[in-house]
């Protein structure tokens, strides 16, 4: 929740997945007094409304409000002596708004919260979204620091009609915190990108038909594909060929992957720092033996550590922790673990004495023990 009792200004900001601290109002942005401005921002997945109260005045433009508890009615809730000031080029989906009067009320088709570059995660608009090219260019251009989006990429990018069929070349500014970027502007023509399993490793291969100013590729792995928040990790950097009209081939071997389904992508980087993402590829890495118990890390630890456990077939498993006298001090799990999925378990030594402990995992087809040293 953002709260202010004096002037408030929110530009190029994503506010996502928040629960309000004042449940009776249910707001994500609460302006108690003064004048507030929200521009080029995205509010998505919050149990919220935009709330102005008492002597406040709120101006909203080029902003998306989406999946934010439509049961509360109007997203711009005005109380007491509040005034809703100017409002233009807003997209608010799932509301019957009597106050904000948004210009667009269709589903913005936002992509999941992800690391799309820049200092924070963002929601990109999907193809055919009314958020694309329906913003106000003057509002976009008035941002502090220039006409750039939340990732530092330029606003007002003409989009090709293959990837975003509803683009408007005369008004390329998007509604929301980030701009959709034209795939036609990518300096590298990616011809293929594949992932194949080789034992417990995954081999990535990709080819380019041509390259311009290509410094190279970051190989990125989605750590947990089942998570609502996509957490991409960079595994390696593979140098590019610079500028060339000849086809190029690249290979990267990803070792030490936990069993389960993995998604990979490439982050192509120019010499000047500009970047773009490849399509994603998916491959399953399977466990070779009956189980895999990962080491406790860090070890020694204080006060917390973690380890992983994967089983080859679904079965009931009990994970416990014993002290040096053989007494059970913690039961971390008791139940079924699904096959070929890496589960993470955490040790909390806050209430334990310093010493050596044994972590024991017992299933229907295996039994394993490993030490964990707690230092205090």
Image (cartoon, grey):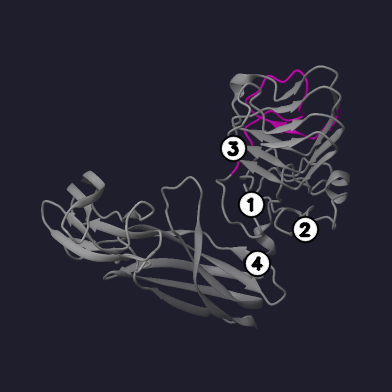
Q: Nearer the viewer, residue 330 or 152?
A: 330
> Where does residue 80 sit, x and y in percent of width and height?
81, 16
For the residue labelled by badge 1, is the local secondary structure a helix, a strand or a loop? loop
Q: Is residue 343 left or right of residue 237?
A: left
In this view of the protein, can residue 315 be seen by the observer? no
Residue 269's quadrant in the figure?
Answer: bottom right
State the SS at label 2.
loop
Q: Nearer the viewer, mark 4 or mark 3?
A: 3
User: Looking at the image, can residue 211 be seen?
Assistant: yes
Q: Position of residue 109 (x, y in %)?
A: 60, 39
The residue under label 4 is 275
Q: Are marks 4 and 1 in contact (CB under 8 Å)?
A: no
Which of labels 3 and 2 is toward the front?
3
Mark 4 is surrounded, within 10 Å at the Cα level, by few (under 14), some (14 to 19) or many (20 or more) other residues, namely many
Q: If the image is split into quadrants, where does the C terminus sit?
A: bottom left
Residue at 62% x, 47% y is 123
Q: Is residue 191 above or below residue 78?
A: below
On residue 162, the disc is 1
> Which residue matches tag 3?
18
């Amino acid at each position: 929740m953002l709260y202010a009792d004096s002037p408030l200004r929110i530009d190029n900001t994503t506010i996502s997945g928040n629960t309000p601290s004042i449940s009776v109002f249910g707001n994500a942005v609460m302006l108690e007094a003064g004048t507030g401005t929200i521009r080029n921002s995205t509010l998505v997945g919050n149990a919220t409304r935009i709330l102005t109260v008492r002597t406040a005045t709120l101006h909203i433009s080029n902003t998306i409000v989406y999946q934010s508890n439509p049961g509360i009615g109007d997203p711009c809730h005005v109380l007491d002596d509040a005034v809703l000031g100017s409002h233009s080029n807003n997209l608010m989906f799932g509301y019957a708004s009597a106050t904000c009067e948004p210009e667009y009320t269709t589903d913005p088709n936002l992509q999941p919260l992800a690391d799309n570059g820049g200092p924070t995660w963002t929601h990109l608009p999907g193809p055919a979204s009314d958020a694309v090219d329906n913003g106000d260019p003057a509002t976009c251009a008035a941002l502090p620091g220039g006409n750039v989006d939340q990732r530092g990429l330029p606003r007002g990018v003409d989009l090709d009609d293959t990837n975003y069929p509803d683009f408007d070349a005369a008004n390329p500014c998007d509604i929301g915190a980030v701009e959709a970027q034209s795939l036609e502007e990518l300096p590298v023509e990616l011809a293929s990108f594949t992932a194949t399993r080789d034992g417990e490793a995954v081999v990535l291969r990709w080819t380019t038909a041509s390259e311009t100013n290509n410094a190279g590729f970051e190989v990125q792995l989605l750590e947990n594909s089942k998570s609502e928040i996509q957490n991409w990790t960079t595994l390696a950097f593979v140098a590019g060929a610079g500028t060339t009209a000849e086809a190029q081939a690249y290979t990267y071997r990803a070792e030490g992957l936990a069993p389960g389904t993995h998604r990979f992508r490439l982050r192509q980087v120019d010499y000047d720092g500009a970047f773009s993402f490849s399509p994603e590829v998916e491959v399953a890495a399977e466990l070779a033996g009956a189980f895999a118990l990962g080491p406790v890390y860090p070890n020694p630890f204080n006060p917390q550590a973690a380890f992983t456990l994967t089983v080859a077939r679904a079965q009931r498993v009990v994970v416990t922790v014993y002290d040096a006298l053989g007494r059970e001090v913690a039961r971390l799990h008791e139940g079924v673990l699904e096959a070929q999925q890496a589960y993470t378990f955490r040790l909390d030594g806050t209430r334990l004495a310093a010493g050596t402990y044994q972590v024991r995992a017992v299933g229907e087809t295996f039994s394993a023990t490993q030490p964990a040293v707690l230092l205090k």
